[in-house]
Amino acid sequence: MRAVAAPRVVIVGGGFGGLYAARALRRAPAAVTLADRSNHHLFQPLLYQVATAALSPANIAVALRRVLRRQRNVSVVMAEAVAVDLRRKRVELQGGALDYDYLVLATGATHSYFGHDDWAAHAPGLKTLDDALEIRRRMLLSYEAAERETDPDRREALLTFVVVGGGPTGVELAGALAEIARHVLLRDFRRIDPAAARVVLVEAGPRLLPAFPADLSQAALERLQRMGVQVRLGIAVTGIDGRGVALGAERIESRCVLWAAGVQASPLARSLGVPLDRAGRVPVEPDLSVPGAPEVFAIGDLAAMKMPDGRPVPGVAPAAIQSGRHAARNIRRLLRGEKTEPFRYLDKGSLATIGRAAAVAQIGRLHLSGFIAWVLWLVVHILTLIGFRNRFIVLIEWAVVYLRYERGARLITGGAQPRLSDRC
Amino acid sequence: MRAVAAPRVVIVGGGFGGLYAARALRRAPAAVTLADRSNHHLFQPLLYQVATAALSPANIAVALRRVLRRQRNVSVVMAEAVAVDLRRKRVELQGGALDYDYLVLATGATHSYFGHDDWAAHAPGLKTLDDALEIRRRMLLSYEAAERETDPDRREALLTFVVVGGGPTGVELAGALAEIARHVLLRDFRRIDPAAARVVLVEAGPRLLPAFPADLSQAALERLQRMGVQVRLGIAVTGIDGRGVALGAERIESRCVLWAAGVQASPLARSLGVPLDRAGRVPVEPDLSVPGAPEVFAIGDLAAMKMPDGRPVPGVAPAAIQSGRHAARNIRRLLRGEKTEPFRYLDKGSLATIGRAAAVAQIGRLHLSGFIAWVLWLVVHILTLIGFRNRFIVLIEWAVVYLRYERGARLITGGAQPRLSDRC
């Protein structure tokens, strides 16, 4: 008698959804393969802290192999998935392929420039470690170029930072940029005054943090304004080039524009051949399976998931984690010959940080802002960071940032030559 | 009566020599400008720890502005110097120039491929943070590619690491690579056995660590061999391409070759128009001034400095620091109308680390190896790291590396696409 080969489960994507799906298959009688184009799991909620020089990449990222080393039924493959062939049950990789019996698609979302792909070169978004290092590089080079610049207009443009998009990432970036200008760099330059730097946050909608209750949006707005951020609500960006941003007839000259406005699902969804929603997401069945392919699940930001009352599940880390675990549990049910069960999203609340000792939080009917919300934000993010070591060192780094207004990762890497001329 | 403008002192280079020169001018009645092409001071002795994923860039580098923020007579300019015009007393920068009354040249050294510049693409050296991140990237990608590779010969080549050069950097890199293979990655892969990886250290001379006493060279050799490193002495590399290394008639197939063999002085020296030595260094006067230009000093790895008995001063960090301070003191003497004094190098000994709890040390007639030398290495490097915060966090990172065989910075950044085909 020969042993029957274990069923093959392929997971594409090692973010929150994919990683928690792999972990939830720990005791499943299956051969699990996790494929990701990078070698690490990234704690994305803290990515803006790398972009603003408070934390190092290694503080918020950990090698996927390391996280999963003890789980012997998982192997990790570093490779980019380019297409899914539902009929042949195969994932095409760059330079290879993976056959599956069950598939979890967890490739998340990427930036959307709303059809203006030429804006990408001038306004980087924030999704990967490389994105964060590029933003850090541009931000620091702006100050260096301003210190050398003799023309006042060009100097002003170099000291103007524009963040497009008033969601959590935009609010966090704008708050951190204002802190860096007003406190961190205060005495470091001789010719420019970093405190004179201008941080502009542009949001097309009527308020910041649209997913939060209105009173918390207002609290965030007031706090940012007190920190010196110029918040522009109800104004859409109509153009971005190497020299600034157009808001209709108005123009803001800036050499450092950051994009936090729109996301769209990973392009892998398009290869499925099923109809997608406007954001490119897969409208999944209640059990998170792809329509017409009951052995394939789409989770996290790649999926358009619905709550029982029809409202969409938000694109946040807890939703990715919960849907990843749910897909894994449904695969285990299928392996046992049982029926799958529908996904129920448990809303634990929302958190967004604004700056030093300031955040907003909504937990059910409880609305918090200010210092208490910030402590909550701190505790939640420390506890959910993967790896004891990361947690401990991040706590120390934060303590230094908090106590001494110090940002230890003020390093320009990625190209030895400063491009000091006109672009930051 | 108008105030007389303070004399202008320009320092080119923010490494050990330049930074300590700037600090030693703290109380000098001068307007000091420090120019560097990067924005940070780098603690180069620990750079191999970034290349081998033990430390993060921010652990061993600090923004130059940050270090010098309190020293109000110094301004920092991030710019690359391209030439020195001794006659007009001017340093030409990319996109600018700096006029000086006194000049300190501290641009250090870069890799030398002994006329084989085509080797550079296949065998990166280790001088900057970007170098270290590139080496880390290649090393980690080799294992990832090997895990995917099905052809046994190609897999073996992907798991072969060659370090060229048996000085301190080569010994440190080879030791760290062996540790990573034998311990750190041990259970992380499913198809390959990282412990089967081959680390080869090639040295053209008859022994390792030629600047150390012979008994310590022997101790380092034995230790590396016990760690599984194949040490090849008395063999010169005759070719390097994208597939491996040629040693005369012999060939080692390898996708990851690291260069630690030769250095040459920074090309800025050539613009001085004075005769240079074989390594491109400026043969300075006893007071460290450039022949024919008593107001210009060359220090550290850029200068060919001599001890009173005629032996050359070694190219190590203490020599850079001491010569930087000495040049600054001579400038202060000149400012007071006094005569300059000759430089006397104080040899405090030599240290090189081999791996976990193993190092060699020579302090005068005292020769140490093993654990005691390693503790000494640890203490010296922690104490000389700039910035309390860096020291503290580096200690914690090292404790984790030591206690748990863990390397927390196992991140592949710098280009999202793995190049998995033939090159690591």
Image: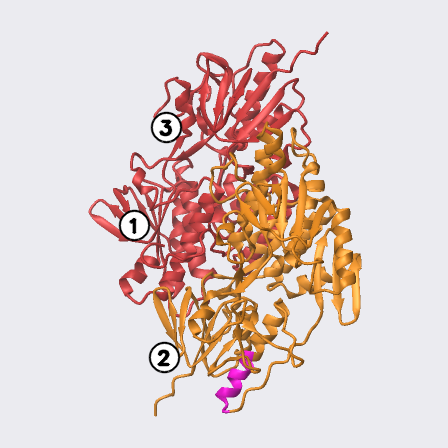
Chain colours: A red, B orange
| Numbered mark located on residue B298 in the image | none
- Camera-near label (3 vs 1) is 1
Within 10 Å of disc 1 (Cα), the crowding (few <14, some 14-19, many 20+) is some
Q: How many C-alpha atoms fall within 10 Å of the one at disc 2: few (<14), some, or many (≥20)?
A: few
Magenta residues?
B327-337
**Numbered disc 2: secondary structure:** loop
Of the two numbered discs 3 and 1 on the same chain, state the one appearing first in sequence.
1
State the count of labels.
Answer: 3
Please, what is the three-letter code of the amino acid marked with disc 2?
Answer: Arg
Assess whether mark 1 and mark 2 are in contact (beta carbons under 8 angstroms): no
Q: Residues within 10 Å of mark 3 (few under 14, many from 20)?
A: some
From the image, give the main secondary structure of the stretch colored magenta: helix
Residue carrying label 2: B88
**Amino acid type of disc 3?**
Ala
Residue bearing the label numbered 3: A279
Q: Residue at x 71, y 44 (%)?
A: B405
